[in-house]
Amino acid sequence: MAFRTFTGLIVSLLLSLSAWADDQSARSGLARNAPPGTRAWTAGDEIQINPSRPDQYTVVKGDTLWEISGKFLTHPWQWPELWSHNTQIKNPHLIYPGDTLYFTVVNGRPQLTLSRSDLAPQAQYQTAPHSPCVLKEDDYKHGRKDFAVSEAGKVLPCIRETDLKQAIRLIPTETIASYLASPKVVDENELGNAPYVVGFAGEHIIVGTGDRVYVRSITEAKNLSHTIYRPGSAYVSPENGEILGYEAQYIADASLQQPGDPATLAITKADREIRTGDRIMAHTEEELTLTYFPRPPEQSIKGSIISVLGGVSQIGRYNVVVIDKGTTDGLLAGHELNIYKTGKIVGDEYSPIKNDAVNLPDEVAGALMVFRPFERVSYALVMKATQAIHVLDKVKTP
């Protein structure tokens, strides 16, 4: 029995950032690209140490680089600076469960050192008692030659035993995987003018994978691959009530079989049932961000959380939210913002002014990272939540 690790696009997102040298260049680029009159975070900024940091921490399965950095730092996005102050942790992306990190201050500079784990692999596999051969990863290096042979003198196949232990990830990217390509944010005309489902082939009442649908006005076979969307809610600015865009809810993937008016499309993958009136858009290969370099925006950003995705009502850690700022405001994938809980208005019964009220200050309630910016709104992952977070809470540059 052979053991393999199948790694697709989404899993590749979980494993790494850019190479260490690229990180250094990216941080330098933050200062170079900062707009006039704004201050970009640079590698020279003083590292802010978490006052409640531990002296040591042993990595456990499920940890992320972001979480571990937050145990030692006030701002986890400063991790490259902290971890570059030592020569032992050459690549923080190759830290494994069971490894122990030690925090020390040497000549006034904080640094981390690493003690590798000698724990056994996370999974051990047993073979049948009479199995002819089990080949471990280091057997060739150790000069193994006692391979099983047949009566004819031919070497028999071996079972290859592989350690599936994986390095920790930067962020829990599986929580955002379903939002990387769909749904999407569109303007009113883009969705309103798109072709739409007008009927179903056969006598189906509910249509799903393997069925065919009829669509108005796809007269040319310019693109065979299409995506079916359903108009969702409007994203509205809490400042002036302006519509910033519309959510296009992902419904299904379809392949064009026959152009025309109506055209015939076959459903190749469905997330939910298709309805008449659902809109069709040609599938386009979007440029996905495969690596993230968390850092503050290069300019001051002040916005609000305007929606939460995933069908949840309470916002907490690792929930995906929508904020009312996008690429036109300078937001890019990887930008981190602090979340502020709006201060309450309380009555002051001791004030000499009758019915006087005081607006309490906003308090930091967490942090989020933008992972998919659109023109005027962005999808962001809540990385930290110290108290309950709600729609209309504010977001600001750290």
Image: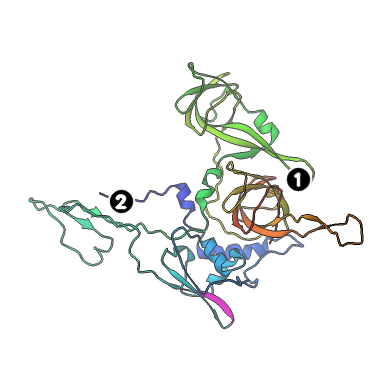
Left-right relation of 224 to 49: left
Residue at numbered disc 2: 3
* Mark 2: secondary structure: loop
Determine the CA span between mark 2 and mark 1: 53 Å
Q: Are marks 2 and 1 in contact (CB under 8 Å)?
A: no
**Place of residue 41 in the rendered image (x, y in percent of width and height, measured from the top left):** 66, 65
The numbered disc on residue 238 is 1
Amino acid marked by disc 2: Phe
Q: Is residue 180 depicted above or below 134 in this figure? A: above
Left-right relation of 391 to 211: right
**Place of residue 197 in the rendered image (x, y in percent of width and height, measured from the top left):** 58, 23
Instruction: Name the residue located 58 percent from the left edge and 54 percent from the top edge.
Output: 317
The numbered disc on residue 337 is none
Magenta extent: 108-112
* Mark 1: secondary structure: loop
Amino acid marked by disc 1: Pro
Left-right relation of 310 to 343: left
- Of the numbered discs 2 and 1, the one sitting upstream in the chain is 2
Q: Is residue 206 depicted above or below 56 in this figure? A: above
Residue 392 versus residue 371: which sits nearer the camera?
Answer: 392
Q: Is residue 89 depicted above or below 279 in this figure? A: below
Whether residue 110 appears in magenta in the rendering, the answer is yes
Instruction: Name the residue located 55 percent from the left edge and 63 percent from the top edge.
Output: 23
Residue 388 versus residue 54: which sits nearer the camera?
Answer: 388
Dominant SS type (magenta): strand
Q: How is the image coloured?
A: rainbow
Query: Do we see residue 335 in this rendering?
Result: no
Of tags 2 and 1, the one toward the viewer is: 1
Residue 301 versus residue 258: which sits nearer the camera?
Answer: 301
Query: Do we see residue 37 in this rendering?
Result: yes
**Place of residue 204 in the rendered image (x, y in percent of width and height, measured from the top left):** 49, 19
Dot 1 alpha-carbon crowd within 10 angstroms: few under 14, some 14 to 19, many 20 or more: some
